[in-house]
Image (spheres, helix red, strand yellow):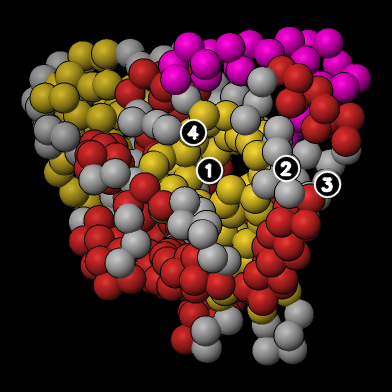
Amino acid sequence: MLGNQIRTYGANEMILREGDAGDWAYLIESGRVLVFVTKDGEEVPLKILGKGEIFGEMSMIDNSVRSATCRTLTEVRLVTVTQDQLLDRIKSADPIVRLLMRALLDRLREQNNGIRGKTLTSAPPPNPEKFDTERREALERIGLENELSQALDNDEFIPHYQPIYDLRTQEIRGCEALLRWVGKDGKIVPTGNFIDALEQSPLILNVGQRMIEMCVDDLVRMQSEIAGNHAFFVSVNVSGRQFADPNFLSHLESVRYRAGVPADRIKLEVTERIMTEGPLAISSLQACRALGYKIAIDDFGTGFSSLQYLASMPLHDLKLDRSFISQMMASEKAHSIVKTLIHLANQLNLNLIAEGIETREQLFLLRNLGVQMGQGFLFSKALPYDGFISLMTGAAAAEKKAA
């Protein structure tokens, strides 16, 4: 079955039967449906469903046969929900959500079996290896979130700073603050091991607030330690979930006022995910721009609807994704894409920052193409505060000597 279909049934018609395969579910648009099981040849009612309720989803989710029968009580109008539509959403769900959904389904089936007089022990899942994998993923996620919570309490999250250079003068104009987790043993936990779990948990709000506080305080220190560089900026990554938090803007403003930092010295980096967080996130983003904060879209060019963001988001910078930078020397297509994005940024009066510059050949090409700023391992990796200040003061001394 492809897409959603409308089905109409008269009163007292069978829709689903116990033991049938479950390829789709139904959403009731109008009418009433009786859900029942059979015990000793008699119907045992479980529930009467009405408008807006769904049925038939249990067997569709876990790919087992129908555990109950459904019959219309009145004329009903139903909208079908296909297995593909539901499974795509389940696969993308958090592993903890998937485990809880599995447990809920098992308990509902236990209730149905109990009513029929069968054992209350739930049947084994149709794919035990897959179920074990899902359970392990969920338990690992729960454990990781507990570790993240403890790390927050122990102040183990700190910013490291990667310099952003003017590609023509090779002067440091600002920096991007990157979240680092420094464990109790002093070792940095690889970002790929925790960042997705952090962004999907409520902890991202507290960690995000802590990052903003530390970055703004460090910005004040940077400006005082590097005399005359009061145009220096710090770029902070902010998730769509943070923008959707009603307290985000008030917290950001209170931190900035306390530190006495102009709003345009703080750049807020977002990704295309913010578009999925709803109108509150976009409204918050626009309010930040109106107050003078600069907005940059990270990894630009990798999203399927990036042009939509340019039309609807109050941007100041585009950050050219490192994948294009790494490919442009060997791929004519990647080179053409970079040129096109540069032209687009110029037409929209947006600054362009190239990420992931690793070779001098990339630097020369980007500079010749008109890219204003960039960052990458060619210049420096992300450094803790003291290391970044040493880099800054060394660069400032070199510039003064050259002058």
Residue mark closest to the camera, 4 vs 2: 2
Mark earlier in primary sequence (4, 2) = 2
Residue 170: assigned label: 2
Mark earlier in primary sequence (2, 3) = 2
> Amino acid under label 3?
Leu
> Amino acid under label 1?
Ser
Q: CA distance from mark 4 to mark 1?
A: 30 Å
- Work out which residue is located at the far front of the displayed protein and give it: 403
**Contact (Cβ within 8 Å) of mark 4 with mark 2:** no
Mark earlier in primary sequence (4, 3) = 4
**How packed is label 3: few (under 14 Cα within 10 Å), some, or many (20 or more)?**
few
Label 4 residue SS: strand
Q: Is residue 332 left or right of residue 387?
A: right
Q: CA distance from mark 2 to mark 1?
A: 43 Å
Q: CA distance from mark 4 to mark 3?
A: 21 Å
> Amino acid under label 2?
Gln
Q: Is residue 207 left or right of residue 52?
A: right
Q: CA distance from mark 2 to mark 3?
A: 11 Å
Mark 3 sits on what residue?
378
Give, as a single range, the part of the protein colored magenta: 322-349
Residue nearer the viewer, 187 or 376:
376
Mark earlier in primary sequence (4, 1) = 1
Residue nearer the viewer, 185 or 9:
185
